[in-house]
Image (tube, rainbow, N blue to C red):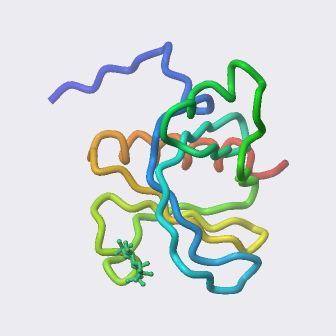
């Protein structure tokens, strides 16, 4: 197989629609609430806005702020175990602040791209 390196692909700036839920907040377990969310990776920040119509407008139009922002500095990602979720392609993201999120896409390649981009962003900003 051939791997083609795309020089225009900047993993530190990426956006798309993902399914997201918090599972832990400030070290405390919270109830899952899966929502479709417009997700933006920008440097060491991961931003979530509500999905479903208009999800893409907030960023360009500056009309509404992200619903939730995650600081990736000192965070970690791994593929979630089956105990964490019955869904496929689930990424588990743990922040230094003690928030744990599950991030999922039904599309294998989409989940893989986000896994790679998040890992790269975390590595890039690890020592800030
Ligand atoms: O880890 P859990 O509790 O099995 O997570 C499931 C629940 O959150 C469920 O909602 P209820 O609070 O009504 O039971 C969700 O509908 C499921 O999607 C959650 O599990 P998955 O395996 O999809 O992450």
**Regarding ligand 1, which quadrant of the image does it lie in?**
bottom left
Query: What residue lies at 68% left-to-right and 26% top-to-bottom?
Result: 59
**Position of residue 101 in the picture relative to residue 2 (left or right):** right
Q: Which one is nearer the viewer's eye here, 39 or 91?
A: 39
Query: What residue lies at 48% left-to-right and 57% top-to-bottom?
Result: 103
Hey, which residue is sitting farthest top in the picture?
Answer: 8
State which quadrant residue 54 falls in.
top right
Hey, which residue is sitting farthest front in the picture?
Answer: 53
Quadrant that contains the N terminus: top left
Residue 30 position, x and y percent, is: 62, 82
| 52 up-or-down from 119: above or below | above
Hey, which residue is sitting farthest right in the picture?
Answer: 128
| 99 up-or-down from 106: above or below | below
Query: What residue lies at 61% left-to-right and 71% top-to-bottom?
Result: 100
Residue 53 position, x and y percent, is: 50, 33
Q: Which one is nearer the viewer's eye here, 71 or 120?
A: 71
Residue 119 position, x and y percent, is: 55, 49
**Position of residue 125 in the picture relative to residue 119 (left or right):** right
Query: What residue lies at 70% left-to-right and 76% top-to-bottom?
Result: 25
Q: How many marks?
A: 0
Residue 5 position, x and y percent, is: 38, 20
């Amino acid at each position: 197989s051939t791997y083609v390196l795309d020089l225009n692909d900047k993993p530190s700036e990426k956006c798309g629609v993902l399914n997201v839920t918090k599972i832990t907040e400030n070290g405390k377990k919270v109830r899952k609430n899966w929502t479709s969310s417009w997700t933006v990776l920008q440097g060491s920040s991961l931003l979530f806005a509500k999905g479903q119509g208009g999800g893409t407008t907030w960023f360009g139009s500056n009309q509404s702020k992200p619903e939730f922002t995650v600081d990736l500095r000192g965070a970690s990602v791994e593929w979630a175990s089956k105990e964490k979720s019955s869904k496929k392609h689930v990424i588990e993201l743990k922040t230094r602040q003690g928030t744990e999120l599950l991030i999922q896409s039904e599309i294998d390649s989409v989940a893989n791209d986000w896994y790679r981009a998040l890992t790269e962003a975390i590595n890039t900003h690890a020592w800030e």
